[in-house]
Amino acid sequence: MSLDIESAKRDLVVAAAAAATAVLVTVVTEVVLGLGVSILLRAVPLYVYFLYRFTRKGGPYASIDTHRTWAVLAAVSGLAIVAYGLL
């Protein structure tokens, strides 16, 4: 079994984006805005990471199935949770 460093780097980018977004969502909703957002909702960026890890199988959508797309999706999901908390 060979170690694919590039694949590990891509996974790390998505994991870091998801983790940073989850922390920022928690800080913004709980500390800055004082909103009572559920921990399950604040963890949505982490769910995006798990989807990235366990659902990627290639296919006709391979051109948009990149680590950058998944990292942006994690960030956008965090923004969506903050917006939901404001409603």
Image (tube, grey):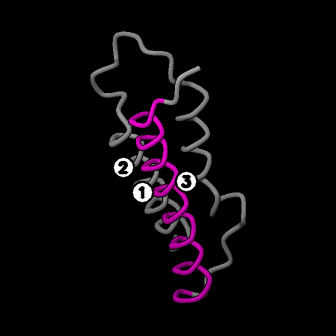
Tag 3–tag 1 contact (CB < 8 Å): yes
Tag 2–tag 1 contact (CB < 8 Å): yes
Q: Compare marks 2 and 3 and give the one earlier in the sequence.
A: 3
Q: Position of residue 22 (x, y in %)?
A: 56, 64
As measured in the structure, the alpha-carbon distance from the residue carrying label 2 to the one carrying label 3 is 10 Å
Q: Which residues are magenta?
A: 4-33
Disc 3 residue crowd, few under 14, some 14–19, many 20+, Cα 10 Å: many
Seen in the picture, residue 2 relative to 6 is either above or below; the reply is: above
Q: Compare marks 3 and 1 and give the one earlier in the sequence.
A: 3
Q: Amino acid at mark 2?
A: Val
As measured in the structure, the alpha-carbon distance from the residue carrying label 3 to the one carrying label 1 is 7 Å
Q: Which residue is mark 2?
A: 72
Q: Which residue is mark 1?
A: 75
Residue nearer the viewer, 37 or 27: 27
As measured in the structure, the alpha-carbon distance from the residue carrying label 2 to the one carrying label 1 is 5 Å
Residue nearer the viewer, 36 or 31: 31
- Point 48% across, 48% down: residue: 12
Q: Position of residue 50 (x, y in %)?
A: 61, 40
Describe the element under mark 3 as helix, strand or loop: helix
Marker disc for residue 45: 3
Q: Position of residue 1 (x, y in %)?
A: 59, 20
Seen in the picture, residue 5 relative to 2 is either above or below; the reply is: below
Q: Amino acid at mark 3?
A: Pro
Q: Position of residue 56 (x, y in %)?
A: 51, 23
Q: In the shown orientation, is residue 36 left or right of residue 17?
A: right
Query: Is 13 within the magenta?
Result: yes
The quarter holding residue 67 reads top left
